[in-house]
Amino acid sequence: MRSLAERHVHAIATATRRLIAEPLTHCLTILVIALSLAVPSTLYRIISDVAFMAKGQAGPPAITVLLRTTVNQDQVIKLSESLKHHQNIATIDFVSPEQGLKELQQRLGSDDVLAGLDHNPLPPALIVHASSSDPTILLALQKEIAASPLVDQAKLDADWARRLHAMTHLLEEAIFALALIFAAAVVIVVMNTVRLQVTAAREEIEVCKLMGASDAFVRRPFIYFGMLQMLLGGCVAFGMTEAARLGFNTLSTEWLKPYGLSFEVQPFHGAEALIGLLLALVLGWFAASSAVSSFLSRLRPR
Amino acid sequence: MTDSVPMIEMNALTRRYPDGREALHGIDLRIEAGEMLFLGGPSGAGKTTLLRLIAGIDRPSGGEIKLNGQLLNRLSAPALEALRKNIGMVFQEHKLLMDRTVEQNAALPLQIQGLASAETQKRVAAALERVGLGGRASDSPLALSGGERQRLCIARALVGKPALIVADEPTGNLDAEYGEAILTLFRSFNLSGVTLVIATHDERLVQSLEGRLVHLDQGRIISDGRTHA
């Protein structure tokens, strides 16, 4: 008896023969599949890198912690040490009253800031850089720090953090919706191609079923056909995404150079590309399987 | 009546089409293993419908049909597939795959059965030799005459070594000489133990061979006897 591997090899050979039989038609189908896969993946790549850069340019969200003027050096060190180990805090900078005054003078452009005052009224401060930009985490962290008896005020630019987070989230959702629409389009394209193949092979399928062929025997070459189209479409899409990425990088370098900035969209990692390709194969399997199954159900004895 | 299980047994078998037309009505028929049975009658008598029920292509609307004691009325898909693998089918319109060679067409049932390549080649070569197409293995069916195509169809039915062959008008498109040759070929299979059920409207041809002749008309059996040979 033929082994299972032999049957699959035979089905792949049949699928390949069908693909080669009409090269122009199938090349166009593969291009449509590739475009449908390339558009959302290119957008995902660019937008996720832009969002990452925006977060990086703005620096991690910071909470300005104004300590009570009565707090001494030892208490500040103790508080800093305890906050350093917090899971949502990345770094802490200490700003002494003298340093704060210096910065204020620089910002105002005047050395006479303390005129009329007998001492520096500025409190010691801590600039706490959070490790997350999630507004919920930031607000909770602000509340937690403000609860300390050493802290007078803990200020957070929550609006900015919320805006950045919402914008990134919205873009991610938009890409996800777009990807779903394009995935549906790909499934429809593959289903239609396989349906046409099934219609063309109608007589062959009927003869096979009359001779006792199982649904799996009939279905197998068409499923490989659909998956092969998706595999080729996925590979072309990968090439398109890379071309778009390189084009975008050239343009962004030109635009950002005068401002002393640089930004490059990174290529897909091996794992990301593999997952994308596997996803495409699953879509191909699903589309082809659905197209053949609906035809086979019509051949069952009534 | 014999006590042994017949190869095919039909009791009050009825087949109604979705439009309400009754193609078969209350058929009682018993076909023993090794028989050569001809189904005669005019067009629309129900011959093809009866063959389709035997092969499990259609399901009966009433009554029952058994193959080797197995009730076909409500067979599951895997059981139906197993059943069809053991039946050789010959169609009037041949149902050959024109984009494949003669050899590939004949090999189709063995591929479906999952037979190893070496054994497939051996059996296909023997089947083609038996029907006189030994030298045409690599030809396209398009290059064959009507009679040769029918012989290829028979080789394809034969290659799986079925215990039962059903043939629907196998001589329908052939002239008398070719038709006789085809029936003689069937007779040789029958002599080697294969049960044959052949639907034909050409009763003159049938009378030249020894066998059982069942006459159908308007979905009913009107006679059941032997041929004159």
Image: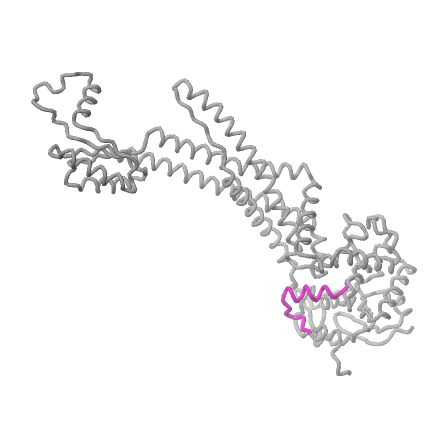
- Of the pair A254 and A215, the residue shown nearer to us: A254
| Quadrant in the rendering for residue B9 | bottom right
Question: Quick check: can you spot residue A10?
Answer: yes
* Location of residue A181 in the rendering, given as x and y in whole percent from the top left corner: 49, 42
* Location of residue A126 in the rendering, given as x and y in whole percent from the top left corner: 21, 33
Does the magenta portion include B7?
no
| Quadrant in the rendering for residue A124 | top left
Q: Which residues are magenta?
A: B70-89
x 68%, y 50%: residue: A9
In the picture shown, does residue A231 fall above or below B49?
above
* Location of residue B186 in the rendering, given as x and y in whole percent from the top left corner: 85, 65
x 85%, y 48%: residue: B143
In the picture shown, does residue B123 fall above or below A18?
below
Does the magenta portion include B75?
yes
Quadrant location, the N terminus of chain A: bottom right
- Of the pair B112 and B168, the residue shown nearer to us: B112
In the picture shown, does residue B8 fall above or below A101?
below
- Of the pair A249 and B160, the residue shown nearer to us: A249
Quadrant location, the C terminus of chain A: bottom right
- Of the pair A122 and A238, the residue shown nearer to us: A122
Question: Quick check: can you spot residue A157?
Answer: no
x 72%, y 70%: residue: B24
In the shown orientation, is residue A183 left or right of residue B186? left
